[in-house]
Amino acid sequence: MKTISLAILDKTPLFAKMLRKYLSEQPGMSVEIISSGFDDLTDRLHIRPVDVLIMDISFPDYLEQIKTLRVNFPQVNILILSMCTDLQVVSELQDLGIYGYISKADDGEELVYAIRMIAGNDIFRNKLFTEALYLNRRRNMTRENNESMLGLNEREKMVVQLMWEEKTNKEIADELFLSTRSIEKIRQDIRDRLGLKSTVGLLKYALYNRIIHLNTNVIISSTSYTGN
């Protein structure tokens, strides 16, 4: 099993050191970087790239910092670990391409589970993350759909639906009798046409425009986590 390399960015040194100790005790995880400053973090990431960055958002310019990280270190998947549970904040961060958002009040096992998912390039959709995805949809239930934005054909809508159901590209390809490469191209074409930068952005677009048929069985939440 490949060891997951981690970086921690947190303004509180004591918390960061305790987190490093906890994560270092988990099988298959290695904390390579621990930093309390953004410039120091980026300097060290240039030398030692990691798989997952666990980042607090107590920094004044955290939005710009995340934008910089996404541009300069696209291979580093970002997991936010914060005391803030404001859905609007989570929603804004989703637009920037984060892979998950966990409250510091949550259980440590959920954090470990999230890290493993994110290291595999999967989005960790706990209750908080999913509620933020629904945010714009709930606020605009009475707004008429913009027909010019609903520019997806039936095959594209089916691909998006299956993405929401957490199907892999291969599973989607098998269900639609297409190649995996065709599914990858369809996903990229949709994002390019709609000006969306990430999978999360595409899911938010689909929720807002009621393209997705909701199925609560696919939501991952702390209450359903079994630790397996």
Image (cartoon, rainbow, N blue to C red):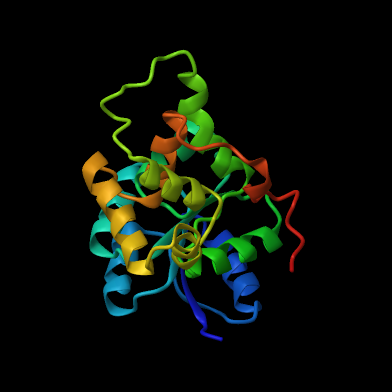
Q: In this image, 222 relative to 146: left or right?
A: right
Q: Is residue 178 visible?
A: yes
Q: In this image, 113 relative to 211: left or right?
A: right
Q: Is residue 85 visible?
A: no
Q: What is the x, y in percent for residue 83?
A: 58, 43
Give the answer, above or below, for where 68 lies relative to 41. Answer: above
Q: Nearer the viewer, residue 86 or 222?
A: 222
Q: What is the x, y in percent for residue 14?
A: 57, 62
Q: Tell me the quadrant of the picture where the N terminus can be found.
A: bottom right
Q: What is the x, y in percent for residue 66?
A: 33, 51
* Count of picture labels: 0
Residue at figure coordinates x 25%, y 26% from the top left = 148
Residue at figure coordinates x 39%, y 36% from the top left = 205
Q: Name, please, the residue furthest toward the front.
A: 177
Q: What is the x, y in percent for residue 37?
A: 37, 59
Displayed quadrant of residue 186: bottom left
Give the answer, above or below, for where 205 lies relative to 219. Answer: above
Q: In this image, 206 relative to 148: left or right?
A: right
Residue at figure coordinates x 61%, y 48% from the top left = 126
Q: Tell me the quadrant of the picture where the C terminus can be found.
A: bottom right
Residue at figure coordinates x 63%, y 64% from the top left = 113
Displayed quadrant of residue 58: top left
